[in-house]
Each structure stands twice: as C-alpha cells, then as structure tokens.
Image (spheres, rainbow, N blue to C red):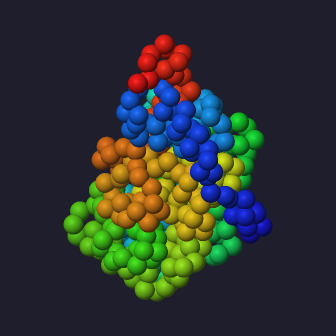
Amino acid sequence: MQLLETTLAKIQPVDEALLAKAQAKLDNKTKPLGSLGRLEEVGRRFAAITGDLAPDTAKKVIFTFAGDHGIVEEGVSLFPKEVTPQMVLNFLRGGAGVNVLARHSGAEVRVVDVGVDYDFEPAPGLIIRKIAKGTRNFAKGSAMTREEAVAAIEVGIALADEAKKEGVAMVGTGEMGIGNTSPSSAIIAAIAGCTVREVTHRGTGIGDETLEHKIKVIQAGLDLNRPEPQDPLDVLTKVGGLEIAGIAGLVLGAAANRMPVVVDGFISTAGALIASEMHPAVRDYIFTAHTSVEIGHQMMLERIGVKPLLDLQLRLGEGTGAALAMGLIEAGVKILKEMATFEEAGVASS
C-alpha cells in the first residue's frame, strides 16, 4: 500500500504554462493557426507532460497485462480461459495483432503475467509478476481481496517507475484475459451508476442469448458485492480483474513520473478509469487511443474526460489501438520539433 500512497502523492496536474509555451511554438510554424488540428493538441500535451518543448519519442513500450477471471465459469465468454495462456505464448512468439502493429509503430511489446492461471517458463519479453492465478467468480463473492488489488496496482506502478529510469518516452496499455469485458462493464456500471445493459456488449462475439445471460450475471455480481462507487479500490476489488488493476497502476505510475501513457480500448480504459477516480489529475497524462465497439467504452471516456484519437471499430484489445495511436502521437511531436518556423523558412507570417 505504501507504493500506491507515495505514487498518488506525487501526481500533479500538467502545468498550463507549459501547454501555452508549446502552443506558441506551434503557432510560429509555417502553417495557418491551428491547421494541423488534433496533431497540434497531441504535440502540445506531450511537451507539457514531459516538461520538454523538444521531447524524445524514440523508446515506446506497450505493456500487455494478462490475467484470468473466475466469472468465466458462468458462461459469459465465447472462449474458455485456456485461451489466455495460449494467447500469451502467441504474444511471446510475435504472432498476435499487437505484435504486428507494434512493429509497424516501432514499439516494443512486454507481456506481464499478473494473474494467469498457468505457470509460464521465463522467456524474453515476459515479465512474471503473478499476484494470483486469476480472480474469483464475482457472481459468488468478491473477485479479489483488497490486498490482492493493491498488489496488482503496485505491479503496474513499479513497471512505470522502471520504464522511466530506462528512458522510455511513452508507455502503452494492453491486456489479455478471457472474460475481461464482464468486469470492465461491472466497473463502469458501479462507478457511473448506469444500468448493466447500457454498458455491456458482445465481447469476443457472443450471441443474443449469451449476451442476455451475461447482463444478468454481471447484475447479480453487483447486487451481491455492492461495490462502493466513491471508493474505486473497492469497485476494483469486488468486481475487477488483476490485469485491470495492473493497468490502473501503470497509468498512475506514468502520471507520477510525468510520462505519457497511451490507453487502448474498453478493458484498458477500465483500468484508466480506476486510476482517474483515485486521482483526477491522472487524465492530464492519458492519451486514449481509440473508440471501441464495446458500448460501455464511450461512457468510460466521458467519465474520465478524454477524447480518443481514432475510431476504427476495433475490439481486439491486446494494445492494438495503442500501437496505432503511438504513431500518430509521435507525428504530432515531430511537427512541434521538426517543422520550420516562418523565420527559418523565409516565409512571411502575415
């Protein structure tokens, strides 16, 4: 708990003066004011987050957190939980969607076993920080103990701290865990006070009958556990996931270290939501990659107060959207750093 408390105490809002300085630099580039739209917003925010008007973007790392979920035994997913470790091994071989898109964006993928019900052998690209072999079934009781939830959050914080020391310029979030749309829906329903139906979708592609069952199971879990909306750690503990907790920790750690964090889709945003509920200034450090097809995602984004960069109808997770968005973010920073000023180009500014 000490690492979590220390990290929360370190988080400060981004300096508005730095945002203004970065925008002034952009306004002197050879273009009409504001003509590069959200690329300017991205470059301005990245500079203000890092405190550098010519920030480095070279080293980009996506942390794909993996964990299993007891709620799967209720039949809420199209796939069995055995797919979680199988996909982790696919990540390590470089064959998954996130691997392909990370290579395209020049990012490294690191897979974090924070809660998979499988014993992995050590392997390059795998970080084994297992807190438990999956969560318990939140339809029958609390998904985790409070101590497990804090420990998983602190895994993410420690990874952010290590990344900062290593010189990583920005981190991205990803996840793998069969059944993890159910805890994600439960988290936003609990925090925002909306109905389960409003925020629950098809996950891996379930049909209408299974969707109805999934909604009933999530509602039953919320009714049983009664998570406290004003206490994000309580919500996470009772209906969350270990990989969601790890992502929350990475987001908190990135904010404490003044490091940009690129948040992927629905499940990753559940982690970012927990982090932003713990400390509202966290949103200043978040770039949200895309709008997921999952219907609860938009409500999460609105609750945090962030606007996604892309809308490609993605719903894969893993960090795929984060990998794509990293390229756009780097482009915005390069405009700030490399585009000529009117004076340098010998162009009249008015």
Give the quarter of the image for residue 73: bottom left
Kindly identify the residue that appears in the image at 23 percent across and 62 percent down. 207
Q: Which residue lies furthest to the left in this view?
A: 208
Kindly identify the residue that appears in the image at 43 percent across and 18 percent down. 348
Residue 303, position as x, y percentages in the image? 44, 66
Residue 321, position as x, y percentages in the image? 42, 43
Quadrant showing the C terminus: top left
Relative to residue 127, is residue 184 drawn left or right? left
Give the quarter of the image for residue 266: bottom left
Q: Residue furthest top?
A: 346
Kindly identify the residue that appears in the image at 56 percent across and 44 percent down. 20
- The correct choice, above or below, for 94 with respect to 126 in the image is above
Q: Which residue lies furthest to the front in this view?
A: 350
Total labels: the figure holds 0
Residue 189, position as x, y percentages in the image? 40, 74
Q: Can the viewer see residue 20 in this picture?
A: yes
Kindly identify the residue that appears in the image at 46 percent across and 71 percent down. 187
Quadrant showing the N terminus: bottom right
Q: Can the viewer see residue 67 in this picture?
A: no
- Which of the pair 62/70 is nearer the observer? 62
Residue 264, position as x, y percentages in the image? 46, 49
- The correct choice, above or below, for 18 with respect to 348 in the image is below
- The correct choice, above or below, for 48 with respect to 79 in the image is above
